[in-house]
Amino acid sequence: MSENTISLYVYKGGQGEITEKKSRFIATVRPVESEDEAVSFINETKKKYWDARHNCSAFVIGKRQELTRCSDDGEPAGTAGRPMLDVLLKENIHNAAIVVTRYFGGVLLGTGGLVRAYQQATKAGLSASEIIEKKDGAVLFIRTDYTGIGRLQYLFAQEKITVMDTAYEADVLVKAVIPENDKKRIEKTIIEQTNGTAKLEWGDEVTFAEYDGEVLLFKN
């Protein structure tokens, strides 16, 4: 994966379902941080749907999607687990596990039909989940006067900069988080926009995401 690739993570798992020729495919998604956690989730889901014909699974873990596993759970080889995993990889999903439970409807789908059904079910499960984009960056503290804040707010909107907090006192203190690849450019732009009057101080390096109007910080 390149440094500019978007990294998507499951923040809250969900469940989606499709029906294909009378077979029910129930996709259950959960965020996971380790292989043990993924295996535990898969076993838990198998117990929940013990009466199903198949509980196929896939998971991907790591910042670079370095750990992947999948299982066809009795379906013809390569028709379930691998197609499910391919969806996770193609969508740049990280640290997530999915189980697609199949209740057989009495009609054989064939190899191509199975691949399409398991992939569609996986997409339905992801659509029912809360997905966030995580970025590496750093906290930036910006102190400016009331004349400069208007220019900064315009800049923040144009650059889609994530502002965590703004304190209005004798002057204005803004706490923002800047993506790693944009740090030098944003710093230069702020200095130019405020004619060098803004005072900048870099804080901690963080991994962050935006969800429901809030800024989420994660441990690196």
Image (spheres, rainbow, N blue to C red):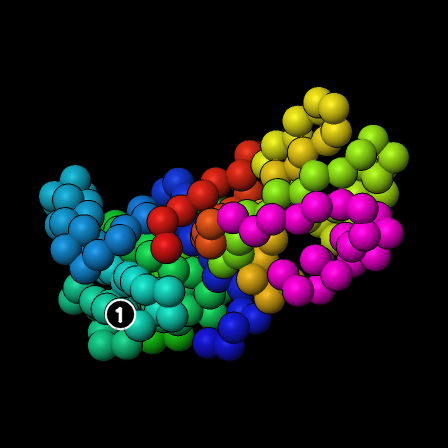
Q: Say whether residue 184 is magenta.
A: yes
In the rendered structure, the answer to whether residue 150 lies left or right of residue 87 reads right
Instruction: Relative to 204, say whether 6 is above or below.
Output: below
Choose between 46 and 150: the one closer to the eye: 150
Residue at the image position 84 percent from the left and 39 percent from the top: 148
Q: Position of residue 186 (x, y in %)?
A: 71, 58
Residue at the image position 63 percent from the left and 61 percent from the top: 183
Choose between 53 and 171: the one closer to the eye: 171
Q: Quadrant of residue 109?
A: bottom left
Residue at the image position 87 percent from the left and 35 percent from the top: 147
Q: Position of residue 139 (x, y in %)?
A: 55, 48
Q: Position of residue 74 (x, y in %)?
A: 16, 66
Q: Amino acid at mark 1?
A: Leu
Choose between 185 and 68: the one closer to the eye: 185
What residue sits right under mark 1 in the picture? 67
In the rendered structure, the answer to whether residue 141 lies left or right of residue 55 reads right
Residue at the image position 46 percent from the left and 76 percent from the top: 1
The answer to whether residue 104 is seen in the rendering is no
Task: Give the farthest residue toward the top.
Answer: 169
Magenta stretch: give its range: 183-203
Instruction: Relative to 170, say whether 69 is above or below.
Output: below
Instruction: Identify the element where label 1 is drawn.
Output: strand
